[in-house]
Amino acid sequence: MAASLTTISMAGAPAALLDPVERLGAVDRWASRGRLRDKFGRAITDLRVSITDRCNYRCVYCRTGNEGAQYAELRIEDYLRMVRIFVGLGVEKVRLTGGEPLLRSGLVEMVGELARMRTAFLPDGTAVGDFSEGLPLDIAVTTNGHLLAGLAQPLKDAGLSRVTVSMDAVDAETFTAITRVPRSLDKVLAGIRAAGAAGLGPVKVNCVLLRGFNDGQIEQFAEFSRREGVIVRFIEWMPLEEDRTWKLETVVTMEEIVARLNRFRPVVELAPNVSSETARRYTFEDGVGEIGIIAPVSRPFCGHCSRVRLTSDGKIRTCLFSQSDHDLYGAMARGGTDEELRTYVRQVVMKKEARHHIGEPGFEKPSRSMVHIGG
Ligand code: SAM
């Protein structure tokens, strides 16, 4: 029996020691306990899966530029089994990420398999009676867009719902200075346009702003959103980089971004799409363009967090800032049944942190950086 299953098991008893009747009891309790929630009552509906630790960009705020992949990647069918476990517990949204997920062979087929899965609960929280009553999953990919031009249509055809492209400058020179890959901007722009043409729009374009580096691009991004019909989302830089260079002074805060946008053209705040929305949404006074601002540093939204993450090597992370991870793949590889894995996931999720502590005295950097977790 898996070491992990013996360390975290039903009612504190090592799973290997439970007799068959007790094991059945564990299954019954699973079935009657409804959708996955943490100890603060937050429903976990959103799973982010890193399908490779490799990345073809070396963004300055994310990576050192010297290290490559550090963690293993698993077979696509292993990720699919783990996703199925989470979906059986109430996950409705699956986002594939990395590393760079478009580097991963088998991605299109994986999206096809995800598109065949159905939610285990209806929007009102009742468990579905049988498979045909469930709804399709919301399937998204976060990518740097470098390879997207050739993959947007196949991904859409396979059942992808949406794509988010990370693009940290509109200006080609600044873009290259950030990614450290020459002539990369044109490829990303082609990818964004291909995604829109394939019906994956409105495409979200995420930009992490760094003071003194790309914060001069705010107005150009506003124009880009208006011109290209994409949703631009500015994200506050978090202390999740490989080389530990984060400083609060480098973070461009939501307040500053809104002030700058207002000077460019007056903005109007939009209502959130859903209560767990991480971005504050704005348009301009003429209704053209959409800007989101995600402010985990200056305005944390942990109270609404509905996410857990699965790393490329199959570990569950309950928060970006966790100090440890939980080896779901290990439990599975050592023969855990679906029921045991569901029990394991439930118990891990109960350990989900209340919130992060960025900027507070005593803040401890997480045990993995963003690129090795999956953003
Ligand atoms: N390679 C893919 C991409 O570029 O979108 C997926 C992985 S990447 C780690 C996911 C997202 O995390 C990107 O949008 C990136 O900008 C963001 N990111 C990386 N490090 C970050 C940090 N320290 N703070 C905030 N966002 C970060």
Image (cartoon, rainbow, N blue to C red):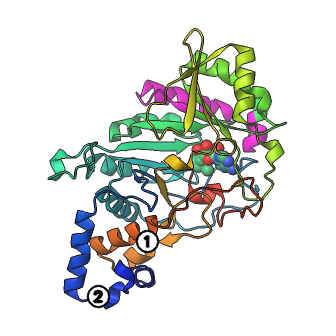
Three-letter amino acid code at disc 2? Leu
Q: Residue at x 41, y 85 (%)?
A: 6
- List x then y, in percent, for residue 174: 78, 33
Judge left or right: residue 64 versus residue 345. Answer: right
Judge left or right: residue 42 versus residue 123. Answer: right
Q: Residue at x 52, y 43 (%)?
A: 142
Which residue is at the far top? 286
Judge left or right: residue 255 versus residue 2. Answer: right
Q: Quadrant of residue 244?
A: bottom right
Q: Tell me the element at label 1.
A: helix
Q: Is 327 situated above or below 62?
A: below
- Mark 1 packing: few (<14 Cα in 10 Å), some, or many (20+)? many
Judge left or right: residue 173 versus residue 120. Answer: right
Asked if residue 180 is among those painted magenta in the image, a careful observer would answer: yes
**Magenta part of the chain:** 175-204
Q: Report the residue marked by disc 1.
A: 329
Note whether residue 219 is visible: no
Q: Residue at x 60, y 42 (%)?
A: 144
Q: Nearer the viewer, residue 95 or 133?
A: 133
Q: Quadrant of residue 284?
A: top right
Confirm or reject: label 1 Cβ below 8 Å from ligand 1. no
Q: Is 321 situated above or below 209?
A: below
Asked if residue 24 is among those painted magenta in the image, a careful observer would answer: no
Mark 1–mark 2 CB contact (< 8 Å): no
Q: Nearer the viewer, residue 334 or 44?
A: 44
Q: Main secondary structure of the magenta part?
A: helix
Three-letter amino acid code at disc 1? Tyr
Q: Is 145 situated above or below 93?
A: above
Q: Nearer the viewer, residue 179 or 268?
A: 268
- List x then y, in percent, for residue 195: 48, 30
Q: Nearer the viewer, residue 107 or 300?
A: 300
Q: Report the residue marked by disc 2.
A: 18
